[in-house]
Image (cartoon, coloured by chain):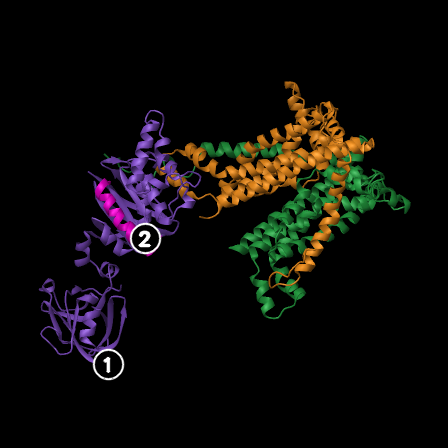
Amino acid sequence: MLRLRQRGVLPGFRLTLGYALLYLSLIVLIPLAATFARASALSPMQFWHDVTTPRVLAAFRLSFGAAFLAALVNLFFGLLVAWVLARYQFWSKRIMDALVDLPFALPTAVAGITLATLYAQNGWIGRWLAPFGIKVAYTQLGVFVALMFIGLPFVVRTVQPVLEDLDLEVEEAAASLGANRWQTFWRVILPTARPALLTGFALAFARGVGEYGSVIFISSNLPGKTEIVPLLIVTKLEQYDYAGATALAVVMLIASFALLLLINLLQWRSSRYYART
Amino acid sequence: MEPVAASNTARHVRRRSPTAESPFVRWLLIAGALLFLCLFLVVPLLAVFVQAFAKGPGFYFKTLTDPATVSAIKLTFITVGIAVPMNCVFGLAAAWAITKFDFPGKNVLTTLIDLPFSVSPVISGLVYVLVFGAQGWFGPWLIEHDIRIIFAVPGIVLATTFVTFPFVARELIPLMQAQGRADEEAARVLGSGGWQTFWRVTLPNIKWGLLYGVILCNARAMGEFGAVSVVSGHISGGTNALGTNTIPLHVQFLYDSYNQAGAFAVASVLTFLALVTIALKAWIERKETRLKL
Amino acid sequence: MSVEVRNIVKQFGRFPALHGVSLKVESGELVALLGPSGSGKTTLLRVIAGLEFPDTNEGRVLFYGEDVTDMPVHKRRAGFAFQHYALFRHLDVFENIAFGLRIRPGRTRPREAEIRERVENLLKLIQLESLARRFPSQLSGGQRQRVALARALAIEPKVLLLDEPFGALDAKVRKELRHWLRKLHEEIHVTTLFVTHDQEEALEVADRVAILREGRIEQIGTPEGIYDHPATPFVYDFLGNVNAFAGRVHNGAVEIGETKIAVPETAGKGDTDAIAFVRPHDIHVTRRPDGPATLAARVVLCHTAGPLAHLELERLDNGGRFTVALSKEQLHQLAPKPGERMFVELRNVKIFPEDYSI
């Protein structure tokens, strides 16, 4: 039996750790255990079958693919926004800086119905795209747009502090060696921001893969075409296909854990990289 | 060789600081960023409020005072009233254990706390269905004792607690880590008891981080959709019954019933809350930077 | 041929950094810009580099006759080394040094083999060949500064500008690098300007030293020249310790207490009050009045610091205190006791007739 030795001078170790572990177990660990237990009740064959039907594979392709693309595009725009906020002064800067957190603070259902309405054929934005034959609402493109919306703050807020802390002397050094502004940006500033960019990308991607509320309103949710994995899980639950839903959930959980580990690893390496030498 | 100076001030037009882009590039970048932000953030924000009042203020207030809406608001408040304080206590306990002591497995604990962040909200709800649902682990036992968790309020509270439980801890842990143990140890040396130390020394130091964590936790709890959607029965409440629709679920209900203006009316309340959250965050951050300087 | 600045005026908000400074550095020379903080020396260096620009049109910067005042920094080929190195942390030592060569536009960029050769030669020069693939975070401060210097030298700069290059290093490393820099300069002969607030460093390393004070050049000269013949009390005091003796100039001699010292420079000028500056090691102490040693003083205290000893004395005529520097041997021979009366001889006296306060 593991004995919790009192460590350190301060009191309350056993109390706080005990409570924290208890709470963690009740709220998080036990339900997760149930999920894995449930999934292990399935035979491997059954499990494999459940997660490789065409409909499921299409959902995986959409969820992961759209999340990947959205995070990628957010890298570009997120860097642009972070750069502008970190380096320049302009009218409305304070408001814009605060607004970047909107997709993070806004409930997903609200984001969902708003984006669906905006990008519909007769919506404020959709009507400008319609003449070009571009349909956003009720298509895979709509899923992409929704995931871009919710992923943006993850990239901006990860990159912004790094850009704000850039050492101007290093930029001056590059200039004194003959680099023009573009060369300095491409060869010095961007590589310095790369760890933060990677972390931001991973965070946005992880969020996008599991996103539900923002997506189901703008997507037409057609099986095999515009159906995301979370929705598929809900559908299976409604049909009492607990086994199928659990199998999918386990795959998603494993992906989530892997991403979580990756993100922690990236953040740990970043903190070493940026540590004041 | 040198031009005769026409005036005493230098020709700044041709001289640019070595770490600044040309004005043209700068304005191009700012314009690009602003255009993107307006399209992606400002327009949707405006859309919520415009759509909310599309049928006039009368309809707006009628929607907000509708029994179903009121019931949804009540349910949300009950949920938040339970989930947030519980998570707050957890956050304080976990942060205290992690930052004031050294023990093996500390990193594992920190990673576990981050778990709900990386899990899809739908799965967050699913795991509770698998434990408490009709076919869950405790399913039969619950049915026997006529206790309803899934498709009832307790399930909603549990799912919301799961999804929002990292927020306070994640705010406090880095903050308390950075503050170190010196203050508390000094208090102990002076004879302060455990609770005393916490109330008089730790709490004042972390009050802004704690407030911010609670605000975030609250905002997320009120707006949680995916997890609650799975465990709820999607039953609208009325004047006599609470129902199992929180505010976000009620928004979905209205929207799916083609009552767009109504859906946005209720959504505007949540949006306003989001704006308050953002404003508070900005305010607290400015306070913290001023304190640090 | 020279690197020259003329009439540089520079103000930062309300703070005037440079008041119309002019300076000429001959090709191949190593000049030190010496002065206290706020004297404008770093600002001057940055103006030469192109990291700052002069405020007025009269201010010009010329590199070997070419007016580069309006030229942006990345075109000037002025190698710059920062006090905190400013190395590229994401690049290893090799790539840091090669940076200036790799970014040259296609036509002027050297081939890969040539880049490698040049970088390896520089690594040999700075004696860090074995560390070529390390990253800056893995190097000591002294090593980093050497890499920064090599990086600046790689572009074959027209002038090398060093901003307090050893300021962030330990005393021992500073001394080593100081000698290393001198040797490097003798090998390479790049026109070099370096900024320092350490007078020992400036006097040891430079061909010429320019002393700056509050945005103006007080004096320029060779190290011996300005040490032996300081133009102002500020320079005198800045370059070493100084004792100030109040006295009176009369008939080509200065009278300090009972001592009369001939000061030919003042002959023909009227009688004035004067301050005489004497270095602590230029004072000779004896027990009996012996020849020129005629100023009476009382021993206050003495203490040793390493190989040197300091003797603090108080003038018997007006109570003014002064310090004498002796070797330990001399102190043992003298064996002074506190309160004892001694007689001192002042050598190498410098008179500044106006009433300067240091």
Chain B hue? green
Q: Residue C339, which numbered label?
A: 1
Q: Residue C173, which numbered label?
A: 2
Q: Quadrant of residue B54?
A: top right
Q: Which chain is purple?
A: C
**Residue farthest to the front?**
A1
Dot 1: chain letter = C
Looking at the image, residue A181 sits to the left or right of residue B266; the answer is: left
Q: Which residue appears at 37% of the width and 37% of the height? A: C94
Secondary structure character of the magenta stretch overall = helix
Looking at the image, residue A90 sits to the left or right of residue C268; the answer is: right
In percent of width and height, residue B183 lies at 57, 63
Q: Which residue appears at 65% of the width and 18% of the height? A: A133
The reply to whether residue A149 is visible in this rendering is yes
- Residue type at tag 1: Gly
In percent of width and height, residue A198 lies at 55, 36
Q: Secondary structure at mark 2?
A: helix
In percent of width and height, residue A165 lies at 48, 45
